[in-house]
Image (cartoon, rainbow, N blue to C red):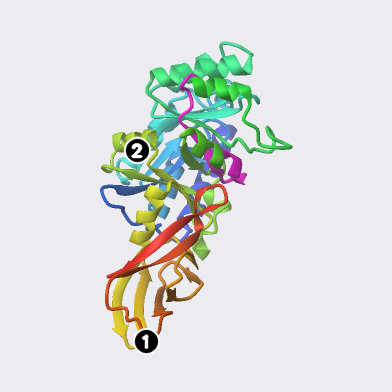
Amino acid sequence: MKRISVFALSLIFSLAASAQTVKHAVIVPDIPGYVTLKGDMHLHTVFSDGTVWPCTRVEEAVLEGLDFIAITDHVELGLTKKIRDGFFNCDRNKSFEIARDFAKNCGVIVIHGAEITRGMPPGHFNATFINDSEALSAASASTKNHVEGMTAALREARRQGAFLVWNHPHWNRQAPNETVWRPEHSDIYAAGLMDGIEIFNHCDGYSPEAHHWAVERGLTIVSGTDAHKMLASRVDYLHGAFRPMNLVFATSRSEEAIHEALKAGRNAVFAEGKVYGDASLLAPLVDGILEIVSVTRHAKGVSIKIHNGSSIPVQLEKSGSTDYGYMRSITFPPGADFTLNVTPLDKGKKLDEPFSIGFKVMNFFVDAGVPLDYTIQVK
């Protein structure tokens, strides 16, 4: 009875703290041909080593206007001891089932996932879009050898149609000196058992090494909060902050479309005011963020009124345009309006015809340390 009471109290406090947080939804535009879906691919609950109930993960997603979350409880940790101690009488699929059923009335897509948790090498991997966490647990537990256990679990996940991600390769506990791609990771990659890599983990931040590996090897870049406690304990919602999240460019708002987009690499990462992804996705995203409200031609040049209607800031630096004079550095905070004045450096030239001006987007990255090249077209 005492155990149940303590657990119930922790759940009540968790939900109460979440309810007291001011709701603010993240706003991100669609890009041509796709709908932009926002989500978190790495979350834990009390059914492994987390401290919150699965329903709380759904409520947190509603708070930020996310479209999807993945419940990725560890298949090796936590639940067996809690069953032995009398807290639970269920299997490793229960946390997903609770979140999925609760989310039916909340408009959040809940993806069935699991974290396969072995020593380094090879470390931890997430398998999402699975149907049976118990089978992954059994495969991982079939041997004490970390590589063999991981490979067996990944093969079982692949049999279930999973999307497979190497988690937090820069985690200090498993990479205390440097972030290393080991021969064991090459073997997993060569076997077709690695679809993506986590380049941003809320506990460890951004990994430039992982980002570059993703670009080199054609892996999907992924973000995850890896949250074990309430997100409100880490994210300053009251002052407008957001959790790190994935921006999936999907053909429709469905689990199947999210899975297809991730497999195809149509994903970007938005974290701490920065966006990471392929130029073919980031350029139209910036187009959608920076809305040209009006273009006014006058004797001295052109005035372009621009509005940022998203939750993503945009930091521009002048690049490549030698025929026109305009500000070298511009920051568009979320919700901001700005008028950009452009003048011809050739005083005898008028800007009556369409023209373009070049920038680098200093908080949008197509590779580690490589900002997006971006052009504003003026008609």
- Would you name the residue on which mark 2 appears? 261
| Callout 2 amino acid | Ala
Q: Regarding mark 1 in the picture, which secondary structure is present there? A: loop
Q: Position of residue 147 (x, y in %)?
A: 60, 18
Question: Residue at coordinates 49% horizontally, 19% vertically from top-left?
Answer: 191
Quadrant where the C terminus lies?
A: bottom left
As for residue 193 lying within the magenta part, the answer is yes
Relative to 2, 174 lies left or right: right
Quadrant where the N terminus lies?
A: top right
Residue 95 picture quarter: top left
Q: Regarding mark 2 in the picture, which secondary structure is present there? A: helix
Front residue (pair 36, 279): 279
Front residue (pair 100, 309): 309
Please tell me how crowded label 1 is: few (under 14), some (14-19), or many (20+) other residues with Cα within 10 Å: some
Q: Position of residue 351 (x, y in %)?
A: 32, 78
Q: Are marks 2 and 1 in contact (CB under 8 Å)?
A: no
Magenta part of the chain: 191-210
Relative to 19, 199 lies left or right: right
Question: Residue at coordinates 39% horizontally, 17% vertically from top-left?
Answer: 159
- Would you name the residue on which mark 1 appears? 300
Q: Which mark is residue 79?
A: none
Q: How far apart, in angstroms, are the residues tagged by discs 2 and 1? A: 46 Å
| Callout 1 amino acid | Lys
Q: Position of residue 8 (x, y in %)?
A: 52, 40
